[in-house]
Image (tube, coloured by chain):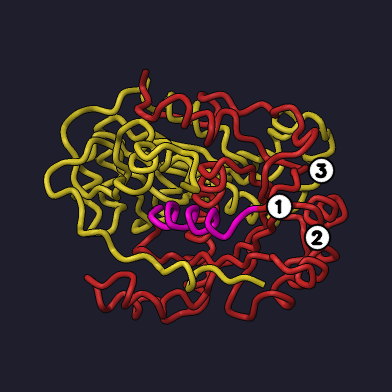
Chain colours: A yellow, B red
Amino acid sequence: MSLVLDQAAQDLLFREARTANTFSDEPVTEEQVQAIYDLVKFGPTSMNQSPLRIVLVRSDEARQRLVPLMSEGNQKKTGSAPLVAILAADNEFHEELPELFPHFPQAKDLFGDRAGREQAAALNAALQAAYFIVGVRAAGLAAGPMTGFDFAGVQKEFLDDDHTPLMIVNIGKPGEDAWFPRSPRLAFDKAVTTV
Amino acid sequence: MSLVLDQAAQDLLFREARTANTFSDEPVTEEQVQAIYDLVKFGPTSMNQSPLRIVLVRSDEARQRLVPLMSEGNQKKTGSAPLVAILAADNEFHEELPELFPHFPQAKDLFGDRAGREQAAALNAALQAAYFIVGVRAAGLAAGPMTGFDFAGVQKEFLDDDHTPLMIVNIGKPGEDAWFPRSPRLAFDKAVTTV
């Protein structure tokens, strides 16, 4: 075998894990979310920028504000998922660099330009969003990541001008008929070339 | 324990895994790269867009073209890593959607606008780049992802107008003094809020 990761872990994180569209009623606990974060926070980002910020939508009041901002096909699942997380990029992440990248105290000064920061934040928060999805699966839960929502509306209702929404993730144990049949993937030779 | 993933897998993928700056001479085989791809291709993307494309830099000739395009601090490690992979987003990914998303034959038509495609490709290829880094670690190898390089130059030398470089990843077994001490991560309460 060319992989070191054991088969059960491969299945849990990638091979058997699926994007869930329905969920059971079993709640997602604060302890589970903390365990997920404490695992995936170690995933690498450029200069340890770590720009991902997560808003957990737990109250009924917040859920009721969020659901109408989802596209029609996503409203029912976001309305019923045990937990919904808004993933966003912090465009002012550079303020944390003196703490996050202590061996290079000038790191913050490289990000004086907002447009450059937004670009860096978008890339690195997306990497962290993927680590987060992997982490949800590591907790034995299913993730349902979505980009079908009103981005400006979600930013206005749940974030601020410095935080750009990236995706929204339904989280929970899969329910009945939780997923479609797996779609095909690109063959290795179509995705990978060698020079 | 709140995680289902076993401790050895947690360590392999996140807790003990580190960004490597030096590598041993041990080659990275084609079988390893295929095994990595065949695992992480299952990571979710929006509508199964799967826009990540990977260029493996294996020949000396290609390596010699790449190294001068790296920023100075990255040249030595990219010059000596057993394998270097250029990760890029395919901005024409929608051409594959009839194959990749067969249960919604109109999917391709949603991406008639190039600017919209570039945005979708950038986000989803970044997710896949993170899955790829996790996959490299799943193969018992260290990844050294970098964004410090001449993006226009790499696009011109190794890609084309339809493929946007995202990052370059050195891959191999870690060498001597492969990494700095681990930088701190944001505390849970600084990264996660609840509403």
How far apart marks 2 and 3 lie (CA) works out to: 21 Å
Check residue B104 in the rendering and tell me which mark sits there, or answer none.
Answer: none
Q: Which residue occupies 66% across, 54% down?
A: B169
Q: Respond whether the residues carrying marks 3 and 1 are from the same subunit.
A: no
Q: How crowded is the residue under tag 1: few (<14 C-alpha within 10 Å), some, or many (20+)?
A: many
Badge 3 amino acid: Asp
**Can residue B12 be spotted in the picture?**
yes
Badge 1 marks a residue whose secondary structure is: strand
Q: Which residue occupies 84% across, 38% down?
A: A106
Q: Which residues are magenta?
A: B28-43
Check residue B146 in the rendering and tell me which mark sits there, or answer none.
Answer: 1
- The verdict on residue B33 being magenta is yes
Q: Which residue occupies 41% across, 43% down?
A: A133
For mark 2, what is the residue?
Answer: B70
**Residue A87, quarter of picture:** top left
Name the quarter where the N terminus of chain B is drawn.
Answer: top left
Q: Earlier in the sequence, mark 1 or mark 2?
A: 2
